[in-house]
Amino acid sequence: MQKYSDRIEKLRKLFPENKIDAIFLSKPEDVAYFTGTKGDDLFLFITEKDAYLITDFRYREMAQKLDWFTYFETGIESKMIDVIKASDCKHLGVCKNSLSLDTYLSFLDELTGKEIIPTGDSEYSLVNELRIIKDEEEIEYTKIAQEIGCQAFAHIIKYIKPGMTERQVALELEYYMLGHGADGLSFDTICVSGEKSSLPHGVPDDKIINAGEFLTMDYGCTYKGYHSDMTRTVAVSSASDEMKNIYDIVLRAQLNACDKVKAGLTGDVCHHFALDIIADAGYGEYFGHGLGHGTGLEIHESPRLSLVYKKPIPVNSIVSIEPGIYLPGKFGVRIEDLAVVKENGIINITSAPKELIII
């Protein structure tokens, strides 16, 4: 397809500044971005003039939709080295945040006469420079995935009752999304209540959801491979004054970040839009993760809205905005939307309500 050829040409234009004349990709999401084909045993080798998708019988039919691919019945790992050996490339780029140590050592041993050059850094590899900026199709797929999640929230708040287990609610969320257009789940659903809601990545189990508790649900799905992500915290039957106060602080922080995040600002600056409000309220030490992260073919991509991300956020990146406060032994609150970053702000693609809901 033309879009994959165009993406490959954009990648080739980055070769000179990275001092490479070819690149090897093994990360499934990277390969899928340039070919539309995703699998664990697909390897992509791109030179200044040619491109080789190296695979075996399992992906042959999928790969045939491309005008180019290289197919081997067996031994694809050794064959991919043969393909690289036979090429004219002298400076081979590899993505160091995805290349296995075993493959790297094999390259050093087998590809004599060719320099192996790691490209980019752990947060911003050469391929990430392209993947971080979404085209209209990628944005539309993400919007669809996020809307499925929002509809799942509308469903689940009518479903939850005291006495249910966290696992029951998590399974119902997943069942709804998969039954209403999702082609997969973005990650293992987080659905935690009461004291467990102070665990940002808590695991749902057979804990009973009781009246007077917070229930935090962090979940997402994929549509045509693109990931959604959202979090909502609800109160079951009732909420104490302390619970309402913490929820209000997190909501104000989230709304402020949604109002101020825009392209060109660095990730650390964006993080402070929420952190400063939470810290001013006296709870800064209880917000210990980043404000957000990019999504796309992976659930966690560049850019990051965090203190350690000093790069500018580009136009048409997609980011989560998800501040939280987590009080050990008591409860936690997190509110998360997904948004497209533009020059003058964001387009929030999350339609689910954010005010405190008591169910």
Image: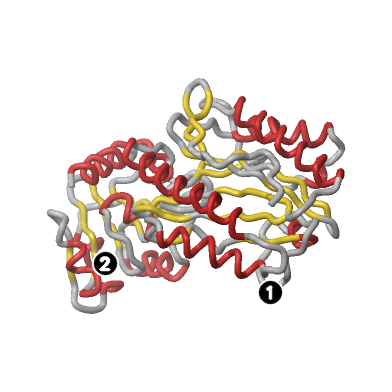
Query: Which residue is situated farthest in the top direction here?
Result: 344
Q: Which amino acid does label 1 sit on?
A: Asp
Q: Read off the residue under disc 2.
A: 80
Residue 308, given in percent of the width and then of the height, sits at: 65, 41
Q: Residue 168 placed where, x, y %?
A: 60, 69
Identify the residue at horizontal 61%, vertical 44% (top origin): 336
Residue 238 locus on image (x, y percent) = 79, 51
Q: Which of 78 and 122 is in front in this view?
A: 122
Q: Does residue 214 appear to the left or right of 20 in the view shown?
A: right
Comparing 80 with 206, the one in front is 206
Between 33 and 81, the one lying in front of the other is: 33
Q: Residue at x 41, y 62 (%)?
A: 179
Image coords of residue 218 (percent x, y): 60, 54
Q: Mark 1 points at which residue?
A: 206
User: Regarding mark 2 in the picture, which secondary structure is present there?
Assistant: helix
Query: In the shown orientation, is residue 24 left or right of residue 2?
Result: right
Which numbered disc, 1 or 2, marks the residue closer to the eye? 1
Q: What amino acid is at disc 2? A: Met
Relative to 348, is 196 on the left or the right? right
Q: Is residue 126 visible?
A: no
